[in-house]
Image (cartoon, coloured by chain):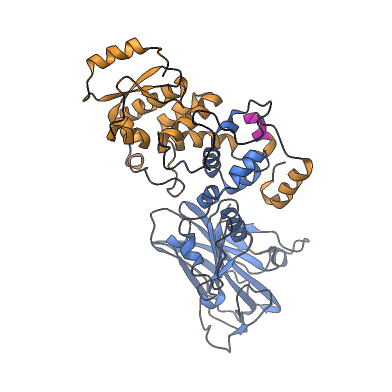
C-alpha cells in the first residue's frame, strides 16, 4: 500500500532491533525513513507518545503520510538536538494547553535551528509540528514567523510572504478606518 | 491517526494528506496561506494586538485568522474574567474575544463598587487602572472644611473630591502588583483639574513618592503647567517628564495629568506598590484642586 522505497534498508534495521529498542522509525510521505529517540519522541510529541503507548508504532517505519521528508528530517533533527541540549525546567513544563500558557522565549539553539530554514521549510515544519502535537516546536516555529510580521504594515507583510491582496479598495478602507489606531506607519 | 488535541481549527472536510488552503490562493505561491487557520492564528497570537489588527488588512485569510477567538484570548490578560466579575455593571462576555478586547481597550469598566476603573492598553493588552479619589487616603479628607465631595458629569466616578483649602497635603493610594500585568513598565499619574481660583499648588516642596518594597522613588511635582511658572510664551504646557520634576499636561478627555513616577512590575512580585503626593515642608495654603484619581497605566 505504501511506496516501497527504502524498504530493504528498513528490513535490515528491523532484524537488528526488536520491540525493546530505544528508537522509533518514522516514514515520510515520500517513503524516506528516519530514526528518532523513543524517549525524545514521546516527550516532545503527544501524537507519537500516544502511538508508542498504544503499540501502534511500526518497526518497518511508522507512516506519517502528511509529512514530507524535508519536514520530517527537521522534526527528527529537532528531537535529537532537544535530547542533547540541557532542557530547562521551563521547557519540560511547557505542556500546558495552547493559548493559556505564557509563551516562553526560544532558547539560543532553538533560534538557530529555525533561523536556518527557508520560508517553505518553516511552514512545512509548522504543519508537521501541528500534526504531531509538538507543542514546543510549534511555538518556536510560529514565533519565528511572528517575528517576521511584528511592526510591519500590511503591504510589508504581503511582500515578506508573497501574498496577494484579495480585498476590494472599499473593504480595505473599512478595515483601516475601524482599526485606525493600529495603522501608525503607512 | 488522530489529530493532536491542540489542533482546534475548524474541521477540514478534505481527506487527510490533502493540503487545505485558507484563502484565495489562485495563482499565488504564498505558502503561508497553506497553513491550517489555527496555525496562522497561533502565529498571530505571538505578535501584539496592533500587529493582529494590521495583519487583518493583509488578506481575507489573514483576517479570518486574526479575528479568531484564540488570538484575542491570548491577548486578553490572564485572570480578566475575575476582574470583570467585579464590574459594577455586567460586561457582555458573549461577544467575540476580539470585540471584548477592543471594547475594554476603548472604554474603561468600573469595578469594586465604583472605586476603580479598569481597561486594557490597546497596543499590548496590559491591565490599567484608575483609583477614584474616594478610594485614596487624603489627609483631612473627611473634613468638609478642607475637602468636599462634588459631582461632575464628565467624571468617570460617581463623585470626586475637591480641595477647598488645605495646608498639610497628603494623597496616597496603592495597588497590589498581582492586579497588574507582569514584566511591564508602568507609570503613575495624578488626574485632576484646576478650578478658576487656585493657589499653593506649585510649591517646590511638593513631592511624589513611589514605594516598591524598600525602595522609594521621589520626584518634585507641579500641578501648574510649565508655562505659567517659567513664563514661556507658549500656552497649554507640554508634558515635561524627567525623573526629578514633573509638570502636568492636558489629556484627551479634558482632564489634566501629572506623572508621579514609574515602576517596573516583575512577574514574581506579590507585594504592594504605594504612591503618594505630599507637601509637608512649607505648609502653604492650597486651594482649587479637583481630584479625579490616580491612574496606573503601561508606559509606552
Identify the residue at image location x=50%, y=50%.
B74
Q: Is residue B159 above or below residue A12?
A: below
A114 or B63: nearer the eye? B63
Image quadrant for the N terminus of chain A?
Answer: top left
Q: Magenta segment: does it hold A133? A: no
Q: Is residue B110 above or below residue A62?
A: below
Q: Is residue B289 visible?
A: yes
- Residue at the bottom extreme? B145
Q: Name the spot of residue A74 as percent of width and height, x first.
A: 43, 24
Q: Where does the magenta region start and end?
A: A156-165
In the picture provided, is B153 more to the left or to the right than B183? right
Q: Is residue B113 above or below residue B126?
A: below
Q: Main secondary structure of the magenta part?
A: helix
Image quadrant for the C terminus of chain A?
Answer: top right
Q: Magenta segment: does it hold A160? A: yes
- Residue at the top extreme? A8
Chain A pictured colour: orange
Amino acid at each position: 500500500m505504501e511506496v516501497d522505497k527504502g524498504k530493504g534498508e528498513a528490513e535490515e534495521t528491523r532484524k537488528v532491533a526488536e520491540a525493546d529498542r530505544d528508537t522509533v522509525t518514522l516514514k515520510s510521505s515520500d517513503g524516506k525513513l528516519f530514526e528518532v529517540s523513543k524517549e525524545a519522541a514521546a516527550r516532545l510529541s503527544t501524537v507519537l507518545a500516544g502511538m508508542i503507548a498504544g503499540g501502534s508504532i511500526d518497526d518497518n517505519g511508522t507512516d506519517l503520510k502528511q509529512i514530507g521528508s524535508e519536514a520530517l528530517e527537521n522534526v527528527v533533527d529537532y528531537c535529537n538536538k532537544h535530547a542533547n541540549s540541557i532542557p530547562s525546567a521551563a521547557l519540560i513544563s511547557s505542556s500546558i494547553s495552547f493559548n493559556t500558557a505564557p509563551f516562553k522565549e526560544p532558547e539560543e539553539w532553538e533560534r538557530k535551528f529555525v533561523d536556518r530554514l527557508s520560508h517553505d521549510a518553516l511552514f512545512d515544519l509548522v504543519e508537521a509540528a501541528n500534526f504531531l502535537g509538538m507543542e514546543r516546536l510549534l511555538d518556536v516555529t510560529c514565533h519565528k514567523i511572528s517575528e517576521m510580521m511584528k511592526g510591519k504594515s500590511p503591504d510589508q507583510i504581503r511582500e515578506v510572504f508573497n501574498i496577494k491582496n484579495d480585498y476590494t479598495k472599499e473593504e480595505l478602507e473599512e478595515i483601516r478606518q475601524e482599526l485606525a489606531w493600529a495603522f501608525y506607519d503607512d | 491517526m488522530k489529530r493532536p488535541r491542540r489542533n482546534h481549527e475548524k474541521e477540514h472536510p478534505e481527506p487527510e494528506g490533502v493540503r487545505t488552503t485558507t484563502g484565495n490562493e489562485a495563482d499565488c505561491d504564498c505558502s503561508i496561506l497553506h497553513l491550517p487557520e489555527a496555525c496562522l492564528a497561533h502565529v498571530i497570537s505571538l505578535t501584539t494586538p496592533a500587529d493582529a489588527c494590521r495583519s487583518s488588512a493583509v488578506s481575507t485569510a489573514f483576517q479570518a485568522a486574526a479575528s479568531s477567538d484564540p488570538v484575542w484570548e491570548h491577548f486578553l490578560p490572564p485572570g480578566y474574567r475575575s476582574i470583570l466579575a467585579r464590574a459594577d455593571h455586567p460586561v457582555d462576555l458573549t461577544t467575540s474575544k476580539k470585540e471584548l478586547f477592543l471594547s475594554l481597550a476603548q472604554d474603561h469598566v468600573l469595578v469594586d463598587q465604583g472605586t476603580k476603573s479598569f481597561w486594557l492598553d490597546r497596543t499590548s493588552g496590559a491591565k490599567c487602572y484608575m483609583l477614584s479619589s474616594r478610594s485614596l487616603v487624603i489627609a483631612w479628607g473627611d473634613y468638609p472644611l478642607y475637602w468636599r465631595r462634588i459631582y461632575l458629569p464628565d467624571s468617570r466616578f460617581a463623585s470626586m473630591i475637591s480641595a477647598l483649602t488645605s495646608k498639610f497635603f497628603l494623597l496616597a493610594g496603592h495597588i497590589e502588583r498581582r492586579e497588574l500585568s507582569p514584566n511591564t513598565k508602568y507609570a503613575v499619574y495624578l488626574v485632576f483639574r484646576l478650578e478658576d481660583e487656585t493657589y499653593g499648588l506649585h510649591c517646590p516642596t511638593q513631592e511624589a513618592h513611589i514605594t516598591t518594597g524598600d525602595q522609594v522613588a521621589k520626584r518634585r511635582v507641579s500641578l501648574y503647567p510649565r508655562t505659567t511658572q517659567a513664563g514661556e510664551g507658549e500656552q497649554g504646557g507640554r508634558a515635561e517628564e524627567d525623573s526629578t520634576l514633573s509638570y502636568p499636561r492636558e489629556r484627551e478627555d479634558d482632564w489634566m495629568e501629572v506623572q508621579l513616577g514609574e515602576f517596573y512590575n516583575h512577574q514574581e512580585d506579590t507585594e504592594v506598590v504605594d504612591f503618594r503626593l505630599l507637601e509637608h515642608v512649607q505648609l502653604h495654603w492650597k486651594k482649587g484642586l479637583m481630584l479625579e484619581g490616580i491612574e496606573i497605566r503601561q508606559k509606552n
